[in-house]
């Protein structure tokens, strides 16, 4: 088992661009997307009109740049596409970065969006002491982070991998606890659960493939554009 923060083995040689010379920018479906789009536009990346068509099932889209396309995929897949060089740039939550810990991923810019936390939760009426437990069954879509968190407490976590409906696991006897993303805590409350501890705070990050960053100047230029935007936003907040 890898210690927290250690890197997974390299994925192998990464491609920097496809045969057409286009950069591929991977962005996630779901909670981060709406917040990410204005940041992308300010950094000079604007999707084609078809991207905003809710009925469009396409996964690849053009942009205002002839040398760049967007792919819209699941958040966990953003990290995989970028780490393996199929995409050179992406936006994803720090939870995904920490879960996979790919050696070929570099996250140079915190975009200050998509804020939430990864937390442990259990039933409100579960009052049994955990401190004496040496083994727990936990439902989560983050098995690596979950195991590392409980291992630090001397507890072996048996992770039941779920991709959704995590809140049902304790009431149905699948797992005593869950590890999931928490924003307001409303979903936990509505399902009779209570947050018991926080594992990490989360925000969205710009990620790049390390090989692409070294070999393609356009990737470095994108990093600089996103970093400059974050600095400008921070300066505006200080003025206000």
Image (cartoon, rainbow, N blue to C red):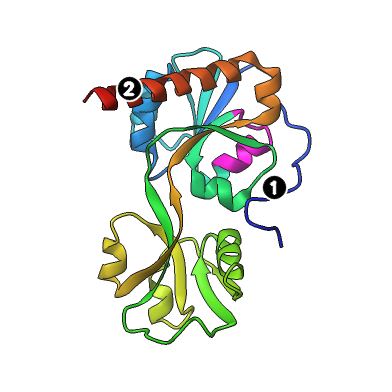
Q: Which mark is residue 235?
A: 2
Task: Say whether residue 150 is left or right of residue 41.
Answer: right
Q: Residues within 10 Å of mark 1 (few under 14, many from 20)?
A: some
Q: Position of residue 161 (x, y in %)?
A: 55, 66
Quadrant location, the N terminus: bottom right
Q: Residue at x 69, y 47 (%)?
A: 7
Residue holding disc 1: 7
Query: Label 1 near label 2: C-beta < 8 Å?
Result: no
The part of the chain drawn in magenta is 78-88
Q: Residue at x 55, y 84 (%)?
A: 133
Task: Say whether residue 102 is left or right of residue 128.
Answer: right
In this view of the protein, which residue sits in the foreground, 59 or 227?
A: 227
Q: Is residue 169 above or below residue 80?
A: below
Q: CA distance from mark 2 to mark 1?
A: 34 Å
Q: Position of residue 42 (x, y in %)?
A: 37, 19
Q: Quadrant of residue 152?
A: bottom right
Residue 18 shows in this picture: no
């Amino acid at each position: 088992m890898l210690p927290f923060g250690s890197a997974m083995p390299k994925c192998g040689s990464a491609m920097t661009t496809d045969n057409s010379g286009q950069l591929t920018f991977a962005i996630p479906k779901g909670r981060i997307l709406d917040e990410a789009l204005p940041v992308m536009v300010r950094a000079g990346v604007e999707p084609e009109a078809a991207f905003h068509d809710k009925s469009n099932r396409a996964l690849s889209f053009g942009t205002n740049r002839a040398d760049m396309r967007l792919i819209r995929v699941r958040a966990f897949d953003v990290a995989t596409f970028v780490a393996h060089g199929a995409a050179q740039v992406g936006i994803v939550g720090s939870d995904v970065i920490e879960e996979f810990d790919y050696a070929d991923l570099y996250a140079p810019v915190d975009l200050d969006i998509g804020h939430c936390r990864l937390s442990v939760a259990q039933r409100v009426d579960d009052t049994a002491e955990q401190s004496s437990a040496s083994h727990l069954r936990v439902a989560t879509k983050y098995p690596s982070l979950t195991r590392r968190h409980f291992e630090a407490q001397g507890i072996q976590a048996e992770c039941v991998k779920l991709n959704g409906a995590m809140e049902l696991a304790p009431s149905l006897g699948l797992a005593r606890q869950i590890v999931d993303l928490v924003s307001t805590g409303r979903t936990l409350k509505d399902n009779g659960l209570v947050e018991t501890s926080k594992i990490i705070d989360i925000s969205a990050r710009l990620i790049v493939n390390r090989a692409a960053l070294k070999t393609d100047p356009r990737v470095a230029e994108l990093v600089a554009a996103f970093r400059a935007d974050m600095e400008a936003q921070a300066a505006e907040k200080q003025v206000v």
